[in-house]
Amino acid sequence: MTDQALDSMLRRVLLDADCQQYGEAIDELPECDFSPAFEKKMQKLIRRADHPIRYRVAQVAACLLLVALLSGCTVLAVSPEARAAFVGWIRETYESWFVYRYTGEEQPIPEDAVYAPTWVPEGYEEIVTPQVGTYVRSQYENDNSELLTVSYLKGTEKSSLNVEWEGAIVQESSVGNLPADLYLNPNDGPSILVWTDYERDAAFWITAPLSGGELVKVAESIQQSESMPRRYSVTWLPLEYGGYYLESENEEAGSGEVVYGNDQGFSITFGYSNDDAQAPRPGTSGGKAVSVTGRAAELYPSGTKGGDSILVWPAAESRSTLWVCAPLPEEELIQIAENVIVQLNRFSDLIEIQTADEGEAPLLEAVEQALTETYVAQVEDCAKRAAETGNYASEEYDQLQNDQMARYISPEREEALARVSALTDALRKEGRSGENIVSLFGPFYTATICVSDDVDYALLAEYGMLDTLEYYFDTTANIVDERGVLIASYQIHYLSGRGETITVPTAEEMQFMYESRQIYLKAYRAAQAETTQE
């Protein structure tokens, strides 16, 4: 972490700059004289946080000084000794959130291993396999469709875990010799266990309808996995040919291939495999000897005008072979190769956007339950009344459909959006760039709030892209349900600062709306036919 970044963090947690003058060391700073209005706010916060959790000794300095943050305070300077006290994970307290943030030197992220539990309660089976990244999630399900989710966030300068505790019974706990926070559900439903591990450089949390003891047992069983095949991704493509889009993608254990389409009609293919024989070397003769970041590589120039040239090279970290195929000059192929990295998943990489098969596809369970006899009869009555007026559109039908979806199918979007958008606005105003993970307590959804760094106007001008700012959103929040399915987004426009909500329908919602429309259409046409006969 740079001195500038660390100073920025400390400014959020130290003494009131308007009231204080700093000295040579932290002990020489005078005490804060808080206003009566501020003291009243703190009393309200203490009443809301009426639970057994108290700040641990290692967090006392940060959390007490956080009082300054809550009153809009800043700091002018801080000694090296004070900086050393803030290395590691700290927990900040907001009105109804705990924020777990890593401060200090970032540790290398394992590129071929993950942490995962070696014990889960009987009856739970793995449905999501963890993959290497800065955010890692594994998930298990039992016969009652109850989920057990184990997640962790690696300690990075620009990421944090935000856990809402409103409505939870918060208790102190421990995972081995590590302190933990247990968010117990007073009703039937999931609880959350959160702890930070400095040696593993991660913040862990488990969400499941289990007792506190069972959650701790799962947590204490977590071990590092055996070596996993590395995955790779491209981070640079030549911009002078216009924009690119994902044309196709194929991935298996130890291998993968991605094709990027281009507005000018050509494509760029990038692939990798643990099996060197899978590399697309044309013919039997060897290629031209070139170098990729100091490693010997093979270049196979195109034999025809406008055809693909192929570059093949070995990965630095493993036995994988990588390749790129495109109708590009040698130097651009090499530049693409030198900007390939080991793929480390972020939260956004694991988001699922659902589609629904219409027509002959089997009804999903939730849809089948929602299409009750009563509802179908009501839809048919709406259609008949609409046919009598000769107007197919029906506000009555629209309201009926929406009410039925809200009762049987739709996720709790409105409440989740209200909470997440409020935090998103706050993070943007604070200028907290990076990826902030949010864990909601009922509904038990998760969100990622990404605040972009400052815009590089010079770079945009260089490529003639300044006009894109008109459509640029510098802050985006994506909300997913318990299974990682995207249900809504909230984004803030860079120039206007205006927030915009996007509803993303689930597969169940899309299928239900389709089936309802078919029932309505059939009844409407039947009613029209009867009127014509009369």
Image (tube, rainbow, N blue to C red):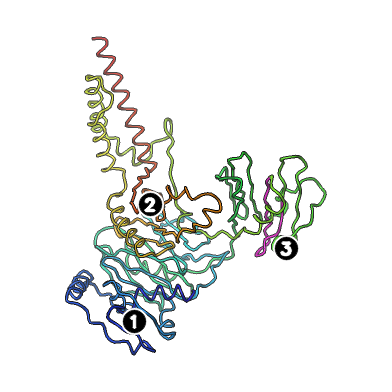
Which amino acid, mark 3? Arg
Which amino acid, mark 2? His
How many numbered marks are there? 3
User: Residue 179's x, y, as percent?
Assistant: 37, 76
Q: Main secondary structure of the magenta part?
A: strand
Please say whether residue 480 is visible from this viewpoint: no
Q: Residue, x 22% and y 31% (percent of image)?
A: 396
> Quick one: label 1, few (<14), some, or many (20+) residues within 10 Å?
some
Mark identifier at residue 61: 1
Q: Secondary structure at mark 1?
A: helix
Mark identifier at residue 295: 3
Q: Quadrant of residue 532?
A: top left
- Reply yes or no: does residue 324 show up in magenta: yes
- Reply yes or no: does residue 389 show up in magenta: no
| Quadrant (top left/top right/bottom left/bottom right) for the C terminus | top left
How far separated are the C-alphas under marks 2 and 1? 37 Å
- The answer to which of 159 and 496 lies nearer the viewer is 496
**What residue does disc 2 label?**
493
User: Residue 224's x, y, as percent?
Assistant: 52, 68
